[in-house]
Image (cartoon, rainbow, N blue to C red):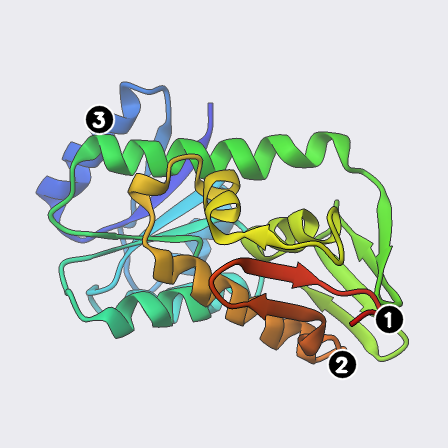
Amino acid sequence: MFKILLIEDDTTLFQEIKDRLGQWSYDVYGIEDYERVMETFTDVQPELVIIDIQLPKFDGFHWCRMIREHSNVPIIFLSSRDHPTDMVMSMNLGADDFVQKPFHFDVLIAKIQAILRRVYNYSNDVNELKTWAGATIDLERNRVSNETGMIELTKNEMYILKLLIERKNKIVSREELINRLWDDQRFVSDNTLTVNINRLRKRLGELGLGDMIETKFGQGYVAKEQGSQ
């Protein structure tokens, strides 16, 4: 049974989500004290976090930052606001997906299942190190390192990098990445992939590798090897 921490202060919506997810055998925990969210996170040790943006005390962006300082657990944002910058900020902070209220429960459940299937299944057979562009890729620990230093990636970022370096110097289409990442592209916006790619490039840039992920406009992305054109 997967544990989900639902950070949602609307008690009616919280109970409805909890009941629906309970039907799928998910164990849902809530927040009693919104000044002690991190204490609850530490106590629960969830496999997935769902966060509303508008919360008492501090907003969801604050708690996403706090969680990302300690964990790469997958995060889904909920929001009743429809400004596109909310989704962009969520992804830049390390969220894995964004669901706008009101939403259909089938969509939320599909997103949850896709993320949990990807994050907790794909790593079972990749307890190995890969090399790419002079860097070591630790798939199990979500780490990339070279002589410059070491960075930790989110689950989404590492999975995108893994898909690209498996076919280095070859184009991987946006459609394939979306389908591999989220299983069903009907439930993901094209902008979500763009934000994840940009965030991955920014992190790789800390190791001098940002330009090794190349955009092929209208086609997809390429993970270049050093010395390739």
Please report whichever mark, 3 or 2, sits nearer to the chain's N-terminal start: 3
Return the mark for residue 146: 1
Classify mark 2: residues with Cα within 10 Å, few (<14), some (14-19) or many (20+): some
Q: Quadrant of the C terminus?
A: bottom right
User: Marks 3/2: CA distance?
Assistant: 45 Å
Of the residues tagged 3 and 2, which is closer to the observer? 2
Residue at which label 3 appears: 20
Return the mark for residue 208: 2
In this picture, residue 15 sits left or right of residue 120: left
User: Marks 2/1: CA distance?
Assistant: 9 Å
Query: Foreground residue, 16 or 107?
Result: 107
Of the residues tagged 2 and 1, which is closer to the observer? 2
Of the residues tagged 3 and 1, which is closer to the observer? 1
Tag 2, which secondary structure? loop
Q: Is residue 94 above or below residue 117?
A: below
Q: How many marks?
A: 3
Give the quadrant of residue 54.
Answer: bottom left
Amino acid identity at mark 1: Asn
Amino acid identity at mark 3: Arg
Residue for point 82% across, 76% down: 149
Q: Where in the figure is residue 128, as x and y percent of width and height? A: 85, 42
User: Marks 3/1: CA distance?
Assistant: 45 Å
